[in-house]
Amino acid sequence: MKTTTRYVCQSCGASQPKWAGQCAACHTWDTLVEETIAASQPKGIAPSSGRKLEFVSLAGAIADAPRITTGISEFDRVLGGGLVKGSATLVGGDPGIGKSTLLLQAAAALAKGGATCSYISGEESINQIKLRAGRLKVSGAQVMLSAATSVRDILTTLDTPNAPDIVVIDSIQTMFVDTLDSAPGTVAQVRAASHELIRLAKRRNIALLLVGHVTKDGQIAGPRVLEHMVDTVLYFEGDRGHQFRIVRAVKNRFGSTDEIGVFEMTEGGLQEVPNPSSLFLSGRTEPVSGAVVFAGMEGSRPFLVEIQALVAPTLMANPRRAVVGWDSGRLAMIIAVLEARCGVGLSDKEIYLNVAGGFKITEPAADLAVAAAILSALADRPVGKDSVFFGEIGLSGEVRPVGRSDIRLKESEKLGFKHAFLAEGSKVKASAGTVHRMAYLRDLVARFASGGENAGVRKLAARPAK
């Protein structure tokens, strides 16, 4: 059989006939790998050679997909209520973040609930998995272990009428299909191995869990089509310097993509955190300048996290602005609005912003809390320890209301916060605490400049607004 050679980009999956240092599609360097494929003559398909499709009405009654609950409520929350039979779930995350630990704990919990589970590892030996199970104290669970990398062997073992209910593949980048000449982990191998395993899951009604490696940019390694093939994509986030881990759904055909699950890494494995706000605020002591509490939302779950800012003078022509846990572009916008609309002089100041605990905030509702943290640091006066902030800031300096204000206030009051600063048009019910409404950002600046409630008495070093 005649063969041809092509060069496939390991970042985007594009192929080209000749090698080049840079991929012409995604412009990444040193990602083209040579692959040999069999050249076959394309043939037409006879209309009578296939089977006829059966159609059903769109209005027909369809039962909800049955769920298999793991017993780990935070994991079930992210999945939308549990695993669905015949589904494929991809779990990605940085090396050592706890992906294998979480899935081994989930498999053990499912096995104790009566489900049949198989854990197939292509990275570790069976003895290594048993050692981890001993540390996690789940050695008694009836989880069947195996070490394999051949997709053909896996299909031969599992493609039977008595297939297990749950199958964990750790990881998909180590699996290989022997009909391809490329090495495991390449675009072609990951695509082919995933396709065969997902077909098996659909055919035998197996809940398939795939572990995926990530690149240095935080994206799941391999072809982007992998995320389109699976039903659910979960990202395991966290910082090794902090004890908490977050499982976030970025795709879910059977549930919401806004939910997160919070875990704490301990010596005995991952422990659930039913109240994330208590974890993120656990390090707060006495009020300090530049520290503000933000009432945020992740899906249907409210959480409180501390935003810290430091403003320092500098002699540099271009002051430094460093951000950890938030969007640097949005910080630049808040600084510009404070200068242009409120007359706050920040052009000769270095600004450092940090979200305490290593948490990452994505919603624009944090704008007001960030502005309050900067003003507090600039005035060198702490904000009240029992105050929370949330609201979006526009380019004209207006403070806009954000969604689910009632839930944010309820969570704040539950944790003892008595003052809430929010937008003028926010629709909230009666609150046990004091609600401070603001129409424009200059109202917040005036509180700091005049020494109002929960603000410093020293005036800000501000120039008149134009």
Image: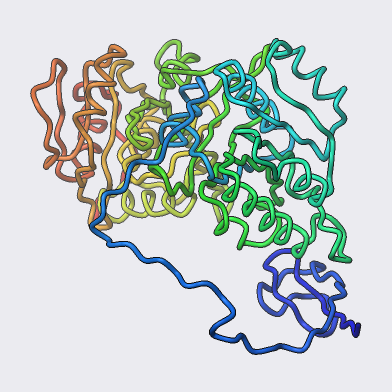
- Figure quadrant of residue 382: top left
105 lies above or below 300: above
- Rendering coords of residue 21 (x, y %): 83, 75
Left or right: residue 42 compared with residue 456: right
- Rendering coords of residue 212 (x, y %): 68, 46
Pick the residue in front: 37 or 233: 37
- Figure quadrant of residue 170: top right
Q: For the N terminus, which image quadrant?
A: bottom right
- Rendering coords of residue 355 (x, y %): 49, 33
Which residue does the image show at 46% across and 54% down from the upper left?
329
Pick the residue in front: 38 or 8: 38
Pick the residue in front: 451 or 127: 127
Which residue does the image show at 27% across and 61% down from the upper left?
58
- Rendering coords of residue 121 (x, y %): 79, 36
65 lies above or below 411: below
Left or right: residue 169 compared with residue 72: right
Which residue does the image show at 59% across and 15% down from the upper left?
112
Pick the residue in front: 169 or 286: 169
Name the colouring of the figure: rainbow
- Figure quadrant of residue 437: top left
Which residue does the image show at 70% across and 58% down from the upper left?
222
